[in-house]
Amino acid sequence: GYPERHAVDFSNVETRRQLSPAAIRGFIGITETWKLNENQIRSLLGGIASSTLHAWKSNPGKRVLDQDTLTRISLVGGIYKALHTYFGAIGDHWITHQNDSPLFGGVTPIEYMMSAGLIGIYEVRRMLDS
């Protein structure tokens, strides 16, 4: 059997302090790979201010993200991993190309996630994992 694993406790401030710098760097790397613009990046993070995003980028080690933001980044990381598992590097283009699946209805996955918020990001992750 597999060892029992528990979900990471994002409500614990010390856990968030430890995870935040790597989460920010990883998220920024993914959004650069996907060639997302600042508006798209800020939207995925829940509509943070431009100045906040730039502060995170310039010094990720001094930031402690909240539970919601870490959840969003975790979901985006899972989407990135799933796309690379299924499609390799060409999966990076999937996020910004129109998709006619019933979930997206002709818009791009990034547009869908921006309009549907956290639930939309979760639904994309769930769809890719199924």
Image: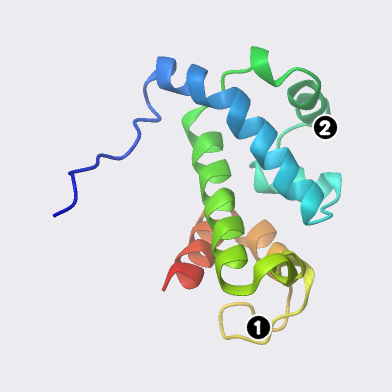
Q: Amino acid at mark 1?
A: Gly
Q: Which mark is residue 105?
A: 1
Q: Amino acid at mark 2?
A: Ser
Measuring from the top left, give residue 20's x and y in whole percent.
57, 25
- Residue 15's x, y, as percent? 42, 21
Q: Determine whether, in the image, residue 29 is placed left or right of residue 104.
A: right
Residue drawn at point x = 82 percent, y = 27 percent: 54
Camera-side residue of 54 and 15: 15
Quadrant of the rendered structure where residue 64 is? Answer: top right
Quadrant the N terminus occupies: bottom left
The residue that disc 2 covers is: 50
Q: Badge 1 local density, few (<14 within 10 Å), some, or many (20+)?
A: few
Q: In terms of sequence position, does the residue under pointer 2 or pointer 1 come before the other?
A: 2
Q: Residue at x 52, y 44 (%)?
A: 74
Residue 87, given in percent of the width and then of the height, sits at 64, 73
Callout 2 touching callout 1 (CB < 8 Å): no
User: Image height check: is 64 above or below 92?
Assistant: above
